[in-house]
Image: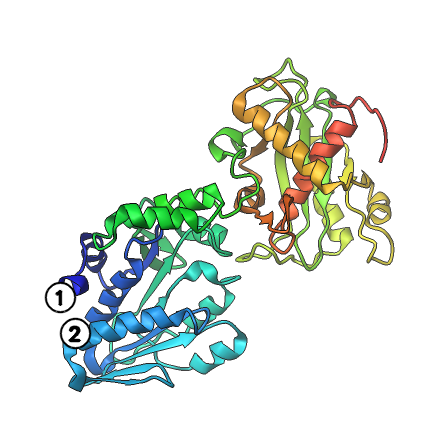
Amino acid sequence: MSDALSPTPYQARMLAIPEHYSIVACGGRGGGKTMGTMFLVLRHVEAHTENARVLIVRRTYRSLQLIEEELHRLLLSVYGARSVSYNRADKVFRLANGATIELGQLDSQSDYHKYHGREITMLVVDEWGEWQDNNLVALLKSGLRSAHGVPLRTVYTANPGGPLHSFIHREHVARAPAWHPYERNGETFVNAPSVYLDNPFLDHEDYIRRLKSSTSDEALFKAWSEGDWNIARGAFFADCLDQKIHQLPVAWHIPVTNRWAPFLAMDWGSGSPSVCYVCLQAPGDVGPWPKDTLLLIDEIATVRPGTLNEGLDWPPSKLADAINERCDFWNIHPEGVADDAKGLDNTLINIFREHGIYMQRPFKNRVAGWAGMRDRLVATRDGTGAPGLLVSARCGYFWQTVPFVERDPQRPEDIITTGPDHAADAARYACMYSLNQGGSGRTIGHY
């Protein structure tokens, strides 16, 4: 085997992971993750011969071309042309030892049905972060089965910054240190990250120069080059929101009185999640926070488990009951700001009023609202003494989504609205409500 087809030290480390562990290779770009995965496939078909059934998927056929060429070259180098047959139309490699390796597209329900019911002993999901959600991949993974005792394995590769960035970060990257096993849903994984410096076959200076020229997004370039999953592609708050600085602990030991001017801020959703925050405004002489700093200390989020952008379809009455229970817990009066859902038979605000919850319509200038929220985050980050913004660790949906909301490429001063922006919207309403109320409950006007 030529040097170019020999494992690098990084790829050798991937190969050293026990076969009964699944692998999530979540690093930067250019580190050799995909080629390392090909070596894992080669070992699998060599070890399990006619019982090995490998499926490698990417989101589009076009993106399969490079992996198709690399795999073909590797198989010919190892087995020779007489022992490898390839049906280019079906994208199936058949080896003389009886093993098969199939390449496929997975971009729709109809694509999934092509593989449903198949025996798959090893599933490779390449460029995992490019899928819009994890539903199809999860369905496909349920097809892993073997009647011959072959260890079942899934191998994912992903770069920071795709549509699944926050899901992969939350469910895998943040679960355990790199190269340490961790459990998720009864399965053992190892995160095996790499960066371009781990690939000795690259001209590192030339590669990093080309990588930098491929994007004007500095945060994305850093994520690609350093493999840092705490940096999100095009993240709107990437330069001003830092969980280590802006997150309050779960515990709250200060009595909540009227001095904290408590209020609620809510973004309504039915098919999408509803998000409601319990908000306080620091009086200035209690705790370490400058006067009128906004503190989001609790959260109600009707998000469907396992998703970020699907709601529980709660009717307003059920949501109102949950809000009243939370207000009773904090001993605050249920009032504040909520967007007014005009699609209901009656407006949300009127329905809430019937349940003793008194809301105003939010200030809806999006650009001004985001600017005000960013100003507060910067004030906290830099310790300027101006009113800031902090968010409790109780607010899990906030921390799952807001650090990763993306800029609108057509309107950079706004965020894209097709992603899970509901927590961000509720926090924006809170910031603008606090500003328009003059802070600490000094009413200066109405919407």
Q: Nearer the viewer, residue 11 or 211?
A: 211
Q: Nearer the viewer, residue 235 or 335?
A: 235
Contact between labelled residues 2 and 1, with CB atoms less than 8 Å apart = yes
The residue where tag 2 is placed is 77
Please tell me whether mark 1 sits on a helix, a strand or a loop.
loop
Please report the residue visible at 66 percent of the width from the left and 34 percent of the height from the top.
371
Q: Is residue 32 left or right of residue 391?
A: left
Image quadrant in which the C terminus is located: top right
Residue type indicated by callout 2: Ser
Residue type indicated by callout 1: Ser
Q: Quadrant of residue 14?
A: bottom left
Please report the residue visible at 58 percent of the width from the left and 30 percent of the height from the top.
377
Q: Is residue 195 visible?
A: no
Please report the residue visible at 48 percent of the width from the left and 55 percent of the height from the top.
162
Image quadrant in which the N terminus is located: bottom left
Residue 2's tag is: 1
Q: Is residue 204 left or right of residue 372?
A: left
Q: Quadrant of residue 140?
A: bottom left
Please tell me whether mark 2 sits on a helix, a strand or a loop.
helix
